[in-house]
């Protein structure tokens, strides 16, 4: 016979919590949920977080040594798979799910990998705003990389045809889903760049997170960052953001928005041109009016009606100066002539005095030369004997028997042949024997002019 509830002994709170704790901890569960809160503060012995689904939420905790061993970056929005058991913290009466193991689940795992890649590329500087290039204002060649069968290509072409019809579009049709999609997307970018485009548009329509994974590829991200021309991305819808969006030069929310970002609207261009034309017309009209007023003012000036007014003062000044010059020149010339005559008289007087002194000195030197001249000696009855080479015979050793000699006297010269010589005879007693009329006789030849 069982005891009624009234006969049972009541339990204490501690006893009740202990029974509940044993019951909960005896059950190990594996569950999946989305992280909604995370508390991972320095100094804590455990990580506290909350997981939820559409109908409920559950507080969880994981000891720090277990959590660090998982290597999971636990963030709000992550979808995780956990293994653990419920436990009660009796002093506070709180229930937690004590997590033994933890790993990303499904899309949560993909998101985790994408987030890790984004952090790594950000640390490398690929997402820095300073390295991103500006989009050309009026590109002439536009490269579009997308699926040729999707709705995105039609949205882009239709938008460009409506807004910016002057651009030439180069389309690289490539797969945008599947494991090989990143490789084809890279080839498409390289293809349109080799065609010389000014900007590349990388687009695709909406889809699930898994569908957009090709645009989270690391190789594609590096290709976009290294592209020689700016890259605009329009991937998925407004909430979707891929790695390609992060490293591109301009991220648009949709393919249509990407096409609108390429160039200004043709209507806006026409409006700007009309405004510029009106402004230029006003400026040119104003300048023409100003120039016309200036020309009218010049045309009404007096000197354009009478040319003499332009140089009349100068002409009168020239006449006055000419008259003064004509009156001044004769007087000036007379004064100059008188002064020149005075100079001439002084020069003549000074020159004559200088020449007189030189004439006297020259005359004295001439008399001295005449006294010393051999001719003067010859005129007094002396003669000069010379060899046939013209040297003076000063000694009997200068000639020998048979030598020819020339004897110069006052009125000419005598050609002689030496018959002999006498040693020691005074020069005053030596006489030259002259034979005439024979072949070997001395031949006298008078030289009327004399030989100097």
Image: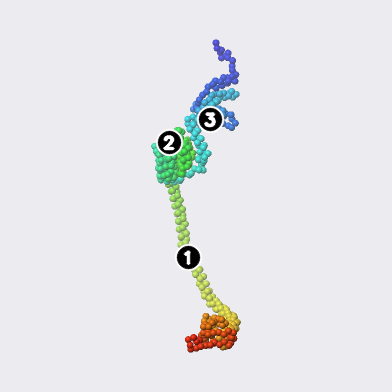
Characterize the local packing of mark 2: few (<14), some (14-19) or many (20 or more) Cα atoms within 10 angstroms. few
Can residue 396 be seen here? The reply is: yes
Tell me if mark 3 has few (under 14), some (14-19) or many (20+) residues whose alpha carbon lies within 10 angstroms of its own. few
Q: Is residue 449 visible?
A: no
- The answer to whether the residues at label 2 and label 3 have Cβ atoms under 8 Å apart is no
Position of 16 relative to 215 (above/below): above
Q: Residue at x 51, y 88 (%)?
A: 435
Disc 3 target residue: 70
Q: Quadrant of the N terminus?
A: top right
| Percent coordinates x, y for residue 24 in the rendering | 54, 22
* Disc 2 from disc 3: Cα separation: 31 Å
Query: Mark 2 vs mark 1: which is more N-terminal?
Result: 2
- Mark 2 — residue? 180
Q: Residues within 10 Å of mark 1 (few under 14, many from 20)?
A: some
**Which of pointers 3 and 1 indicates the residue nearer the eye?**
3
| Residue farthest toward the top in the current orientation of the protein | 1
């Amino acid at each position: 016979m069982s005891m009624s509830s009234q006969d049972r002994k009541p339990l204490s709170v501690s006893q009740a919590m202990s029974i509940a704790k044993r019951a909960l901890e005896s059950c190990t569960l594996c569950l999946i949920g989305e992280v909604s809160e995370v508390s991972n503060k320095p100094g804590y012995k455990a990580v506290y977080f909350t997981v939820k689904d559409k109908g409920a939420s559950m507080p969880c905790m994981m000891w720090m040594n277990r959590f660090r061993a998982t290597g999971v970056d636990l963030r709000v929005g992550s979808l995780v798979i956990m293994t653990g058991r419920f436990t009660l913290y009796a002093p506070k009466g709180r229930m937690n799910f004590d997590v033994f193991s933890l790993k990303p689940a499904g899309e949560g795992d993909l998101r985790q990998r994408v987030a890790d890649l984004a952090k790594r590329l950000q640390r490398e500087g690929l997402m820095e705003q300073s390295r991103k290039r500006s989009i050309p204002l009026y590109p002439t060649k536009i490269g579009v990389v997308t699926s040729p069968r999707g709705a995105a290509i039609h949205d882009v072409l239709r938008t460009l045809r409506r807004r910016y019809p002057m651009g030439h579009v180069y389309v690289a049709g490539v797969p945008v889903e599947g494991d090989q999609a990143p490789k084809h997307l890279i080839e498409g970018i390289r293809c349109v760049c080799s065609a010389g485009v000014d900007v590349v548009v990388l687009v695709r329509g909406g889809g699930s997170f898994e569908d957009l994974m090709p645009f989270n590829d690391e190789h594609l991200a590096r290709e976009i960052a290294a592209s020689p021309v700016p890259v605009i991305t329009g991937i998925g819808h407004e909430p979707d953001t891929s790695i390609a969006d992060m490293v591109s030069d301009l991220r648009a929310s949709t393919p249509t928005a990407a096409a609108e970002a390429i160039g200004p609207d043709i209507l806006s261009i026409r409006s700007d041109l009309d405004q510029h034309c009106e402004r230029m017309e006003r400026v040119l009209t104003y300048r023409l009016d100003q120039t016309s007023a200036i020309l009218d003012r010049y045309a009404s000036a007096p000197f354009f009606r009478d040319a003499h007014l332009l140089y009349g003062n100068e002409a009168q000044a020239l006449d006055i100066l000419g008259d003064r010059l004509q009156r001044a020149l004769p007087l000036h010339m007379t004064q100059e002539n008188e002064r020149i005559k005075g100079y001439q008289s002084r020069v003549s007087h000074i020159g004559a005095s200088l020449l007189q002194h030189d004439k006297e000195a020259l005359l004295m030197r001439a008399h001295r030369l005449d006294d010393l001249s051999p001719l003067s000696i010859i005129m007094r009855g002396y003669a000069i004997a010379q060899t046939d080479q013209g040297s003076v015979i000063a000694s009997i050793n200068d000639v020998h028997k048979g030598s020819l000699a020339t004897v110069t006297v006052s009125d000419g010269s005598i050609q002689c042949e030496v018959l002999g010589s006498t040693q020691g005879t005074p020069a005053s007693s030596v006489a030259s024997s002259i034979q005439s009329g024979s072949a070997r006789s001395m031949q006298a030849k008078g030289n009327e002019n004399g030989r100097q």
